[in-house]
């Protein structure tokens, strides 16, 4: 069963290891964004690593704005090359998002949002329904009780 754009957006918001997760989630959730043809949805961490190293060079050489690449590479570096992944490709206009997960749409490994040369990334805001998800996650993370003033000293 295909994963809905809303489920992907919610899962992206939960992926704390992706620095630009809100921007990517907003793009995925936008009504203009639609799934794109994806003949190679089933892939592996090693294949993703190899393909996106080449794409990163191309994006840089053609002056294409992209977010999420560094976080994707960081996550992939800790994975075995044979680890199975699923790729979702979504497009709207001249922008594309590639989202990689473990097959259930929930365990997001990484995501990259990029456009075309000379085209700025979209500034799409999160739909109200997803803003509620984000705020409830922040409330759930707030520590209760006494503040630990020395928590960051060891790190």
Image (cartoon, helix red, strand yellow):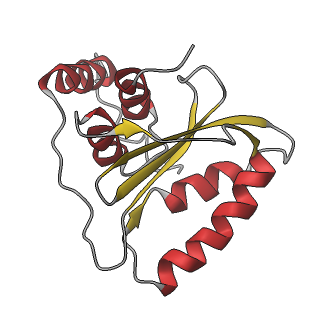
Image quadrant of residue 30? Answer: top left
**Closer to us: 111 or 42:** 42
Image quadrant of residue 67? Answer: bottom left
Q: Farthest residue to the right: give it.
A: 82
- Classify the position of the N terminus by image quarter: top right
Residue 65 drawn above or below residue 62: above
User: Viewed as shown, does residue 68 lie left or right of 93?
Assistant: right
Q: In x, y percent, where is residue 107?
A: 58, 27
User: Viewed as shown, does residue 111 lie left or right of 120?
Assistant: right
Residue 136 drawn above or below residue 149: above
**Closer to us: 67 or 95:** 95
**Residue sitting at 40 percent across and 42 percent down?**
150
Q: In x, y percent, where is residue 138?
A: 27, 26
Residue 141 drawn above or below residue 153: above
Q: How many marks?
A: 0
Q: Farthest residue to the top: give it.
A: 1
User: Viewed as shown, does residue 12 lie left or right of 55?
Assistant: left
User: Viewed as shown, does residue 10 lie left or right of 69?
Assistant: left
**Closer to us: 98 or 108:** 98
Q: In x, y percent, where is residue 100?
A: 59, 40
**Residue sitting at 32 percent across and 60 percent down?**
94
Q: Farthest residue to the bottom: give it.
A: 61
Q: In x, y percent, where is residue 93?
A: 28, 54
């Amino acid at each position: 069963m295909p994963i809905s754009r809303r489920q992907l957006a919610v899962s992206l918001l939960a992926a704390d290891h992706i620095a630009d997760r809100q921007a990517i989630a907003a793009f995925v959730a936008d009504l203009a964004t639609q799934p794109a043809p994806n003949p190679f949805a089933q892939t592996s961490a090693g294949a993703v690593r190899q393909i996106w190293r080449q794409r990163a060079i191309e994006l840089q050489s053609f002056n294409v704005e992209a977010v999420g690449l560094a976080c994707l590479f960081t996550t992939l570096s800790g994975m075995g090359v044979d680890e199975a992944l699923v790729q979702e490709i979504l497009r709207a206009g001249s922008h594309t998002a590639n989202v990689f997960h473990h097959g259930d749409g929930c365990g997001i490994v990484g995501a990259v949002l990029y456009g075309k040369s000379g085209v700025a990334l979209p500034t799409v805001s999160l739909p109200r329904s997803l803003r509620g998800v984000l705020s409830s996650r922040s409330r759930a993370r707030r520590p209760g009780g006494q503040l630990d003033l020395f928590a960051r000293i060891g790190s």
